[in-house]
Image: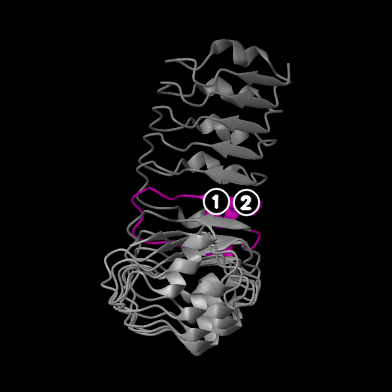
């Protein structure tokens, strides 16, 4: 037998019958109530994938370090309070997921796990990172979200193979310029809910990045270099203190979603009208008093959220947006709620909320 699955089976003990399956390659024991893994696990020398997510493990036996064929180990949502030292011997391990445990520190010798491509250690109690982490230059994804990190070193720039990086929901006060060296980032960069007040201009070098999240920080301005993010599809900036956007945003030709809710924007740049591929524009909870006529250039726009601003009128150019499906103007005080642009939009089926 090559595969054994008892996920969600209500098990309270590790099934003994597994130990009699020396050719086992995949074992899925996730979402049970298992409290311990027995030493006999070391017999499964062919095991390549082991899923133990959602159990009640507080540790792992040393014998797990004998599983030289292991490539994926999933331990999310357990009760581990320390990084299992035996894992450092698994030099061929490609995926290690430890999300949602109680681990306070990653080991200094983490770089011994040179085969790691995907490391998830979010949702733990990390307050710092070992130097060895930044030597894992083969990493493709790194998740350190939901910890208590306050500092990211310049050494992060060594991880140039990363495609995804999640540092959200920490207490990081400064983003190093070296983050701009991660030119392999293509999937997403998540920096939400930290404490920083600025981002480095070097972010503009991430020209293959598709998703950038900088929400719920204390940003008051953005570098013009963000306009160089030619591949960016989604940009989330809500919950900051921005008073203006760079004119360079008009160069974000791949952008499909722009989320600006909960800032202090009094105006949008004229150049925003160049984003003819934009589908969603959310500017709720700002202090806009007008929209530029250039919004008529947003010919791909389907959803426009303008709730809770200070608008008195809307530009006639909005009526010409051919794909607009929903326009939300609630909690503004328009001088003429029955204006011609709104009448035209309603007439062709656009949902207009006042």
- Mark 2 residue element: loop
In which quadrant will I find the N terminus? top right
Count numbered badges in the picture: 2
Q: Main secondary structure of the magenta part?
A: loop
Q: Quadrant of residue 42?
A: top right
Number of other residues with Cα within 10 Å of mark 2, as a class: few under 14, some 14 to 19, many 20 or more: many
Task: In the rendered structure, find residue 116 and report the number of the disc placed on it.
Answer: 2
Question: Does residue 249 appear in the picture of this structure?
Answer: no
Q: Position of residue 341 (x, y in %)?
A: 46, 73
| Residue located at (60% from left, 10% from top) | 17
Number of other residues with Cα within 10 Å of mark 1, as a class: few under 14, some 14 to 19, many 20 or more: many
| Residue located at (45% from left, 53% from top) | 107
Task: In the rendered structure, find residue 137 and report the number of the disc placed on it.
Answer: none
Q: Please tell me whether residue 107 is drawn above or below residue 8 in the rendered image.
A: below
Q: Quadrant of residue 20?
A: top right
Q: Quadrant of residue 193?
A: bottom left
What stretch of residues is rendered in magenta? 110-138
Q: Please tell me whether residue 106 is drawn above or below residue 137 in the rendered image.
A: above
Q: Nearer the viewer, mark 2 or mark 1?
A: 1
In which quadrant will I find the C terminus? bottom left
Q: Identify the residue position indicated by label 1 in the image.
A: 119
CA gap, disc 2 and disc 1:
7 Å
Q: Position of residue 297 (x, y in %)?
A: 58, 79
Residue 267 versus residue 224: which sits nearer the camera? 267
| Residue located at (62% from left, 58% from top) | 139
Question: Does residue 346 appear in the picture of this structure?
Answer: yes
Residue 64 versus residue 181: which sits nearer the camera? 181
């Amino acid at each position: 037998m090559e595969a054994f699955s008892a996920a969600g089976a209500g098990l309270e003990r590790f099934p003994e019958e597994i130990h009699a399956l020396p050719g086992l390659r995949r074992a899925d024991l996730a979402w049970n109530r298992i409290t311990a893994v027995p030493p006999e696990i070391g017999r499964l020398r062919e095991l390549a994938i082991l899923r133990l997510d959602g159990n009640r493990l507080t540790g792992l036996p040393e014998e797990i370090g004998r599983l030289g064929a292991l490539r994926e180990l999933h331990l999310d949502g357990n009760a581990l309070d320390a990084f299992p030292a035996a894992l450092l011997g698994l030099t061929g391990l490609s995926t290690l997921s430890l999300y949602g445990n109680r681990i306070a520190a990653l080991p200094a010798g983490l770089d011994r796990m040179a085969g790691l491509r995907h490391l998830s250690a979010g949702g733990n109690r990390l307050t710092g990172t070992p130097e060895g982490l930044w030597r894992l230059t083969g990493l493709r994804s790194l998740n350190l979200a939901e910890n208590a990190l306050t500092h990211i070193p310049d050494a992060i720039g060594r991880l140039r193979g990363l495609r995804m990086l999640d540092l959200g929901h920490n207490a990081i006060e400064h983003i190093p310029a070296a983050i701009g060296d991660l030119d392999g980032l293509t999937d997403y960069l998540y920096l939400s809910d930290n404490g920083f007040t600025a981002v480095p201009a070097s972010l503009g070098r991430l020209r293959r990045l598709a998703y950038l999240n900088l929400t719920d920080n204390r940003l008051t301005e953005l570098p013009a270099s963000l306009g160089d993010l030619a591949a960016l599809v989604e940009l989330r900036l809500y919950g900051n203190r921005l008073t203006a956007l760079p004119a360079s945003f008009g160069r974000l030709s791949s952008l499909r979603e722009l989320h600006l809710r909960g800032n202090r924007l009094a105006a949008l740049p004229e150049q925003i009208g160049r984003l003819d591929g934009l589908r969603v524009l959310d500017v709720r909870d700002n202090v806009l008093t007008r929209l530029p006529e250039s919004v008529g250039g947003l010919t791909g726009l389907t959803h426009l959220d303008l709730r809770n601003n200070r608008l008195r009128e809307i530009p006639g150019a909005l009526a010409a947006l051919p794909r607009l499906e929903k326009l939300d103007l609630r909690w503004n005080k328009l001088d003429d709620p029955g204006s011609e642009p709104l009448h035209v939009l309603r007439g062709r089926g656009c949902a207009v909320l006042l």
